Amino acid sequence: MPRLKHAFKSAIDRGARSVRRRLLPFSDYDQTIPPEIVDDEFYEVIRSIASEAPVESMLEIGSSTGEGSTRAFVEGIHANARRPQLYCIELSRPRFKLLVERYRGDPQVHCYNVTSVPGDRLPTETELIDFYEKRESKLNRVPLNEVLRWLRQDTRYVSRLANQNGIRQIKEQNQIDRFGVVLIDGSEFTGSAELDEVYGADYILLDDIGTFKNGHNHERLIADPAYRLTASNPDLRNGYAVFKRLGQAAVEKGPTPAARL
């Protein structure tokens, strides 16, 4: 009888998984992806900043499996006399698993399987379509239907984490008032909200400045006298930029929250 109950339960579980697969289309977050920032110009910039910046904490948003920009950060912090701590955010479970395995035992690396900002801070489809149709960007290389599919799967994937705010969680758990270095390279659709959460960091690094992810962030920091552009290459993949904070007074006054594109 116990075997019969177990077989029946297994059949029910298989059926439930089959239904979920049909109702919830396959997500890109369910697979690993190759790193993009690998031994190139931006990789070297990240490693240099991580090794020389006189800071105590660094945040990487979008660590993936830890083979690209994360490796640049780790090489840098190991050479930094201040021994800064690196906090890595990765939303995808399969990628996060490999990230943890790769840096297990490194006392300077701390990995979080969280969403950087709550799901309600993602753009609406109307806002995304407006950006796509009214602004010429490298995002236009991708068909609009595919871009909308990305947004819908991000919204669905993040919804499982309710109103989680990973950036604030990391700050609170580690008593961090302001990060020293931040790389924004996570979801295509959370860049603006992430910048709101880390504004005031000594160094802000942006990848994909030529798309929705960090296009507006790039313009916002260019216009802010509290930050100075120290490195940039709009032609490397979708472009990158690095900003360094200048005066404490300007930051304390605070930026004017920008309207979402």
Image (cartoon, helix red, strand yellow):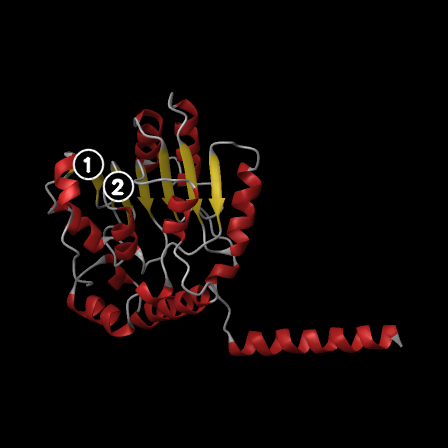
Q: Residue 72: image x %, image y %?
A: 40, 34
Q: Judge whether residue 66 can be spotted in this image.
A: no
Residue identifier under label 1: 245
Which quarter shows the C terminus?
Answer: bottom left
Mark carried by residue 204: 2
Question: What residue is at 25 percent from the left and 63 percent from the top?
Answer: 140
Q: Judge whether residue 83 can be spotted in this image.
A: yes
Q: Residue 10: image x %, image y %?
A: 75, 73
Q: Nearer the viewer, residue 75 or 245?
A: 245
- For the view shown, which residue lies furthest in the right direction? 1
In the drawing, does residue 63 fall left or right of residue 20? left
**What's the amino acid at mark 1?**
Arg
Measure the C-alpha gap from mark 2 to mark 1: 8 Å
Q: Residue 4: image x %, image y %?
A: 85, 77
Q: Is residue 175 depicted above or below 8 in this figure?
A: above
Helix, strand or loop at disc 1? strand
